[in-house]
Amino acid sequence: MDIVNKVRAFNQDLVKYYEISISDLNPLSDKAVKVYDSKGNSYFLKETKINALEKYRFLESQGVHNVIYPIKNRKNDYVTRTMSQAFYLNNYYNDYTIVKEAKAQQLFNELNNIHDKTSYSRQLNPSTARPKFEEITNRLDYKYKMLENYVRSVEAKPLDIYSMPILANYQYFLDAKKELVRLQKRIISTIKARESVDYSFIHNNPKLDHLLNIDGGSFLVSIDNGKIGVESLDLAKYYIENEDLNVDYKNIINSRYKSSNPFYYDYFRYMVLLIYIARLNISTDEYISAGEFITTSNSIKKYFKNFSDYDDTSEEV
């Protein structure tokens, strides 16, 4: 059932839980619609997972104010459950339009605000971390083996406009692998020492569209995929999502991590490179789109320009 039919089926629950009856609706995505009531008021209605309720309750309990909370239903809950689905309802807000670079800086600030507000210290556990890193290592080894086979197949053919940029940029992937190994050693060293690091609520889907400028403030929305984790993952995804904007990422990331435990900066860099390699689509017959190959290599080049740390001599474990 598509979202339009789901919402129409949900209309009786809107009346029951919110005293709102839909007069019209406009699909926004496969999970969200803009709905209008008989009085002409507009709302944002989104299908979600039931655990979104616990996330909003947690953020409220932590005094987080830079998130747009759903309208509470007649049961005083942020999320309404039916027999087969869960929804939440918001007033529909028109985002104040600003240049993307300025909005990217705002998003960075609001992510850090929610990280700081929900932060707590937790000791790293080697026994749970070890199998995760073993799985990551196995996946990386497999991906790089396929990548090597692909490049070797290109080398075996006559040079042309297709093969030349691939062969010229392959070294960046090898540099990324070396950097991943280096950073993983440092991260594992911190884990083995059972150091305590800060965990917090991370948005986990930090797109510009998930920040609204309304009523003189900036607010995060769509926290459905949020979870407890190390903030470095959130900022890695934030950077990758917005890396093509004209933003001084080297400066703003350093402003966050320069004076903190090196673990956070290491983990940020590790996750950036890991995501680049993980999302590279290599088919079963070991074919890669030349465009995707070049795009990823360019991203890796920008990474080393912004975040490389070759002067560090503390990588031995």
Image (cartoon, rainbow, N blue to C red):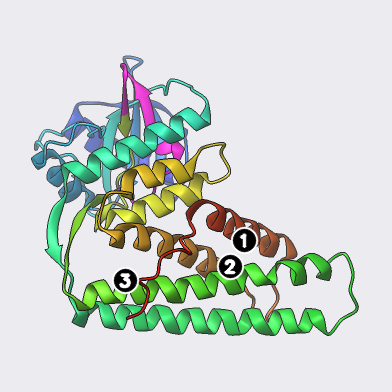
22, above or below 276, in the image: above
Dot placed on the residue nearer the N-terminal end, 2 or 1: 2
Q: What's the amino acid at mark 2? A: Leu
Q: Is residue 83 magenta?
A: no
- Looking at the rendered image, the disc whose residue lies closer to the viewer, 1 or 3, is 3
| Residue 36 seen in the current view | no
Kindly check if marks 2 and 3 are in contact, taking CB atoms under 8 A apart as contact: no
Rounded to the nearest whole Å, what is the CA distance between mark 1 and mark 3? 24 Å
130, above or below 243, in the image: below
How would you rate the neighbour count of disc 1 (Cα within 10 Å): few for under 14, some for 14-19, many for 20 or more? many
Please give left or right for residue 302 compared with residue 197 in the image.
right
Under tag 1, what secondary structure?
helix
Rounded to the nearest whole Å, what is the CA distance between mark 2 and mark 1? 8 Å
Please give left or right for residue 85 compared with residue 288 in the image.
left
Under tag 3, what secondary structure?
helix
Kindly check if marks 2 and 1 are in contact, taking CB atoms under 8 A apart as contact: yes
Under tag 2, what secondary structure?
loop
Dividing the image into 4 quarters, which one contains the C terminus? bottom left
210, above or below 205, in the image: above
Percent of width and height locating residue 29:
47, 42
Q: Which residue is mark 1?
A: 296
Q: What's the amino acid at mark 1? A: Thr
How would you rate the neighbour count of disc 2 (Cα within 10 Å): few for under 14, some for 14-19, many for 20 or more? some
Q: Quadrant of residue 138?
A: bottom left
Q: What's the amino acid at mark 3? A: Ile
Q: Which residue is mark 2?
A: 280
Residue placed most toward the observer, 72 or 298: 298
Q: Which residue is mark 3?
A: 187
Percent of width and height locating residue 58:
13, 46
Rounded to the nearest whole Å, what is the CA distance between mark 2 and mark 3? 24 Å
Percent of width and height locating residue 129:
25, 77
Percent of width and height locating residue 262:
30, 60
